[in-house]
Image: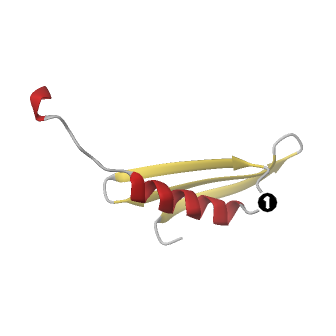
Amino acid sequence: YDLCIGGKTGYTKKAGRTLVTCASNGDLDLICVTFRCPEDFEYHENLYKLYFKKYQYFFDLDTF
């Protein structure tokens, strides 16, 4: 995934296969962690695409 800036796979008997990844898009960084996910790389990519698309930064001018 082009926006992925790092990741680490792992395995334990209790958690099974694990994957931790981080992706960055502009000012937004997201982290995804999965356990026992057979399609973990695809799952992470799909989550990043979904949440980068849904996220919108806004602020209330009255708070300044």
Q: Quadrant of the N terminus?
A: bottom right
Toward the viewer: 33 or 47? 47
Residue at 42% in and 57% down = 52
Left or right of residue 46: residue 61: left
Q: Position of residue 56 (x, y in %)?
A: 31, 50
| The image quarter in which residue 9 lies | bottom right
Query: 13 left or right of 59?
Result: right
Q: Secondary structure at mark 1?
A: loop
Question: Dot 1: few (<14), some (14–19), or many (≥20) neighbours within 10 Å?
Answer: few
Percent coordinates x, y for residue 28 in the rendering: 36, 52
The amino acid at mark 1 is Pro
Total number of numbered discs in the rendering: 1
What residue appears at the point 58 percent right and 50 percent down from the top-left corner?
32
Which residue is identified by label 1? Answer: 38
Quadrant location of the C terminus? top left
Image side of residue 16 versus residue 44, left or right: right
